[in-house]
Image (cartoon, helix red, strand yellow):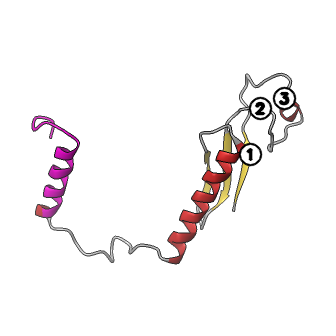
């Protein structure tokens, strides 16, 4: 479960009462919103790159949904995956480079 909180900047509006009261859930300014909590074992704490509370809620739900999807049907670990031949990996790399428009001198 992730908890959303607003991380106030040093230049936050002087009239923001939440900053003065040190409240984390603030709707009266546009400082960035962060998410904090545990998803599985590791702690998740990062900015959601928005000051809009509704967008932050959407991002939080998306992060939690992706984490629960991985818990239910996690992809095979690298040890369980089928090995990739060097020739196939090289061809994939070169086709990706061509798709991105890289010149032969760059590759």
Q: Does dot 3 land on a helix, a strand or a loop?
A: loop
Q: Does dot 2 land on a helix, a strand or a loop?
A: loop
| Residue marked by disc 3 | 16
Q: Position of residue 18 (x, y in %)?
A: 85, 35
Kindly report the distance in space between the C-alpha atoms of the residues bearing marks 1 and 3.
Answer: 15 Å
Which numbered dot is residue 70? none
Q: Position of residue 82 (x, y in %)?
A: 25, 75
Q: Residue at x 14, y 56 (%)?
A: 90
Q: Which residues are magenta?
A: 88-107
Q: Is residue 50 left or right of residue 83?
A: right
The N terminus appears in which quarter of the rendering?
bottom right
Q: Residue at x 14, y 63 (%)?
A: 88
Which tag, 1 or 2, sits closer to the chain's start? Answer: 1
Which numbered dot is residue 5? 1
Residue 91, placed above or below residue 85: above
Q: Is residue 100 left or right of residue 64?
A: left
Which tag, 1 or 3, sits closer to the chain's start? Answer: 1
Pointers 3 and 2 in contact (C-beta within 8 Å) = yes
The local crowd at label 2, few if under 14, some if 14 to 19, many if 20 or more residues have their Cα within 10 Å, is some
Q: Is residue 94 magenta?
A: yes
Q: Does dot 1 land on a helix, a strand or a loop?
A: strand
Q: Position of residue 72 (x, y in %)?
A: 53, 77
How many tags in the picture? 3
Question: Quarter-wise, where is residue 61 in the image?
Answer: bottom right
């Amino acid at each position: 479960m992730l908890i959303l909180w607003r991380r106030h900047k040093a230049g936050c509006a002087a009239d923001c009462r939440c900053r003065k009261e040190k409240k984390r859930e603030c709707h009266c300014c546009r400082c960035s919103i962060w998410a904090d909590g545990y998803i599985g074992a590791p702690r998740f704490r990062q900015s959601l790159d928005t000051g809009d509370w509704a967008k932050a809620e959407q991002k939080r739900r998306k992060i939690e949904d992706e984490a629960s999807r991985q818990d239910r049907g996690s992809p095979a670990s690298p040890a369980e995956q089928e090995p990739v031949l060097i020739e196939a990996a090289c061809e994939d790399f070169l086709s990706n480079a061509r798709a991105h428009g890289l010149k032969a001198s760059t590759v």
